[in-house]
Amino acid sequence: MKDHSLSVRLLLNVGHGLDHMFLLVFASAVGVIAQEFGMTSWEALMPYGAGAFVLFGLGSIPSGRLGDLWGRRRMMIVFFVGLGGSALLVAATQTPWQMAAALTLLGAFASIYHPVGIPLLVQHSANPGFAIGINGLAGNMGVAFAAVATGFLVQWLGWRAAFVIPAVASLACAVWFARECPVESEAPARRKGAAAAKLTPGTMARAMLVMTVSAATGSILFNFTTNGNAQMISERFEGLVQDPATLGLLLGAIYAVASIAQVVVGKLLDRFAVKPIFIGIVLFQIPALLLAAHAQGWWFFVALMGVMIFIFGAVPFIDVVIVRYVDDSLRSRVAGIRLAVSLGISSLAVWSLGPAVKDLGFATLFQVMGGLAVFALIVVSLLPPEPRPSA
């Protein structure tokens, strides 16, 4: 079958951007929200957002199962509608516990995208690595947009507008996607696809174990940085830049540049084996994290740019492994299980971020992340050999 139409691919990539953006609006505006809710500091409010990331991980199992058995098109419509509706509820909250409940619901709908949207995107793609790279770029542009747009909207219209305006966009995408994406003739579980390589059961199990553990460590690094960068850049630029909108632009610029790494990595993965590229990306995370632990001012800006380039650059690997080795009829379920494990573990990063910063400080936190990157390097080195794909 031929690839999806341009409009469907565009909407799937926009959906990835919205998915990551909604999960980070709270982190970008947490200081202002904490003041309005009468809390002493942003660190005290930050744990209330952990439920979104717990459901973002655990919800991946039923989301992936429904994607394979019920249909990926239907689930993507539920995704857009649910994401927009739950964001409107977040905007209406008045207390920390109301915020926690609404964010948890948002996380449940956000869990749909990765096990459903990415398999839908690549199921007919001739260059899945490049498609995943572009999709990763779109997702991280959502991260960048969360930093920039939230900064301006908080300054001009208040933090509630930072949820309402994207919510309206998500609901509009639901209508557009329902019109543009053809109805599936049968659910993915009823048809057979093809993986690009065949592995023995033992090698497959080893690959899945390495994939899950490395995904968990990568998700912890991703969550610690993307949820803490807004506060850290404010701390390290104290006395140089104070304006929230300007700080948001600086952080958005870092995310925008770092996101390009995913496209480059995705293109390489269509031509070369996964393992050596993956090892190289993780290896460079270590010095970048250690440098960011102690840098100040503009040197911190440079160091954080390096950190995010190599953290974002590691994102496409897991999805490419799934595409290469798992039949399309099973991909949503396999993706859902590994996401539930890795994101469930990494959600602890969001819950512990505020207390960790309060007790240890950002410098020690970045050193700990450097140690985690060393562990990830060891895990990735255990990835079994795989046939070199055709160019």
Image (cartoon, helix red, strand yellow):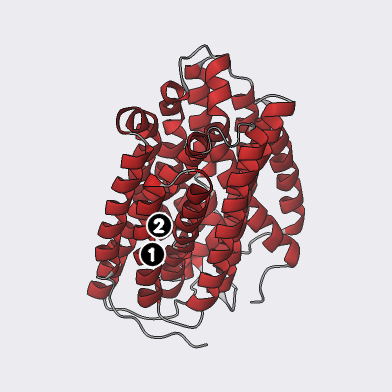
Give SS at disc 2. helix
Q: Which of the two residues, 1 or 356, is positioned nearer the viewer here? A: 356
Q: Residue at x 26, y 67 (%)?
A: 205
User: Is residue 16 visible from the viewing direction of this image?
Assistant: no
Q: Residue at x 50, y 60 (%)?
A: 309
Residues at circles 2 and 1 in contact by the CB criterion of under 8 Å: yes
Q: Residue at x 52, y 11 (%)?
A: 38
Q: Which residue is mark 1?
A: 284
Q: Which mark is residue 310?
A: none
Marks 2/1: CA distance?
A: 7 Å
Q: Amino acid at mark 2?
A: Ala
Q: Amino acid at mark 1?
A: Phe
Q: Is residue 287 above or below residue 149?
A: below
Q: Quadrant of residue 283?
A: bottom left
Q: Is residue 347 above or below residue 182?
A: above
User: Is residue 7 visible from the viewing direction of this image?
Assistant: yes
* x and y, in percent, of residue 147 in the image: 61, 41
Q: Which mark is residue 288?
A: 2
* x and y, in percent, of residue 1 in the image: 64, 77
**Neighbourhood count class around disc 2 (C-alpha, 10 Å): few under 14, some 14–19, many 20 upward:** many
- Pick out the residue farthest to the front: 239
- Pick out the residue farthest to the bottom: 390
Q: Residue at x 73, y 41 (%)?
A: 169
Q: Is residue 152 left or right of residue 293?
A: right
Q: Which of the two residues, 301 or 331, is positioned nearer the viewer here? A: 301
Q: Is residue 161 above or below residue 178?
A: above
* x and y, in percent, of residue 386 in the image: 34, 81
Give SS at disc 1. helix
